Amino acid sequence: MGAELAGAVIAFDLDGTLVDSAPDLVATLNVLLAEEGLPPLPMREARQFIGRGAKWLVERGFQAANTPLRAERVEPLFHRFLAHYEAHIADESRPFPGVVEALEALKADGARLAVCTNKLTGLSTRLLDALDLSRHFDAVIGADLAPAAKPDPRHLEVAVAAAGGQMSKAIMVGDAATDAGAARAARTPLILVSFGYTEVPAADLKPDVLIDHFDALPAACSRLLGACEPRSGGL
């Protein structure tokens, strides 16, 4: 295992894939709800709203609290969310088990690593820095640095290019429909984790590989890239 990974780009979603960030994201949402006189949302319900960016989380959270937001209220609440979240971005957020070891193994085999997330880039780098994960990545591309956010394939394409790779030798690793949509539209192999944040179960999104732990990631990447390699042969 390993030769297939040399020069490849493995692009990762962030929230729900690399980092269990739901405790701090949902806590911030619940602060906003409390300030508006609304009851908190349980973690199990709110965590599935993560993945389309903070603004979507705020809108979807208030909708779940039976208080849909008028258009003019979204932006002020979004900025209040950002202010609180930035100050508490890694209070309880932690990498999922096996993440660091998997990233180190992929890098040791010559892969380049990128983060391709609908989270804003500044928040993404702040979270990665706080958890000592930034050193593993060649590029971090949030939705604000792409022409359009996932599931638009251009987000993934920009992330792969920023890491110095090519789409012909790239893999998307994520947890939700946004990741699956970007990978499929870009015709890129797709690995999903089974433990992330998604309204549609990861298995129902039909990834090329579904993993239950990051221990399985390096071998899965090697296998998928090997299947994509042109093979010489003769009659």
Image: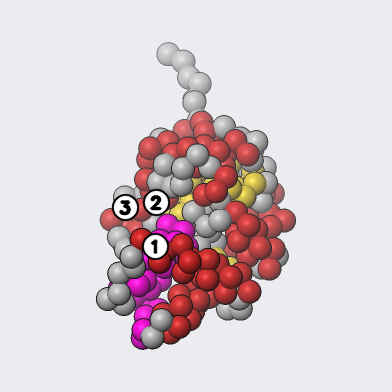
Horizontal side of 210 relative to 96 (left or right) equals left
Residue holding disc 2: 178
Kindly identify the residue that appears in the image at 52 percent across and 49 percent down.
Answer: 143
- Which SS does the magenta portion mostly show? helix
Total labels: the figure holds 3
Viewer-nearest of labels 3 and 2?
2
Instruction: Point out the image quarter for the N terminus.
Output: top right
Magenta-span inclusion, residue 44: yes
Q: Which one is nearer the viewer's eye here, 132 or 127?
A: 127
Q: Does the magenta stretch include residue 22?
A: no
Are the residues at dot 3 and dot 1 in contact (C-beta closer than 8 Å)? no
Marks 3/1: CA distance? 34 Å
The three-letter amino acid code for the residue at tag 1 is Glu
Picture quarter containing residue 182? top left
Query: Alpha-carbon distance for marks 3 and 2?
Result: 10 Å
Which residue is labeled 3 in the image?
A: 205
Which residue lies at the image location 67% right of the left edge and 42% below the top edge?
Answer: 110
> At numbered mark 3, what does the secondary structure look like: helix, strand or loop?
helix
Looking at the image, tell me whether mark 3 or mark 1 is earlier in sequence order: 1
Give the residue pinned by disc 1.
Answer: 72
Q: Can residue 211 be seen in this view?
A: no
**Which residue type carries mark 3?**
Leu
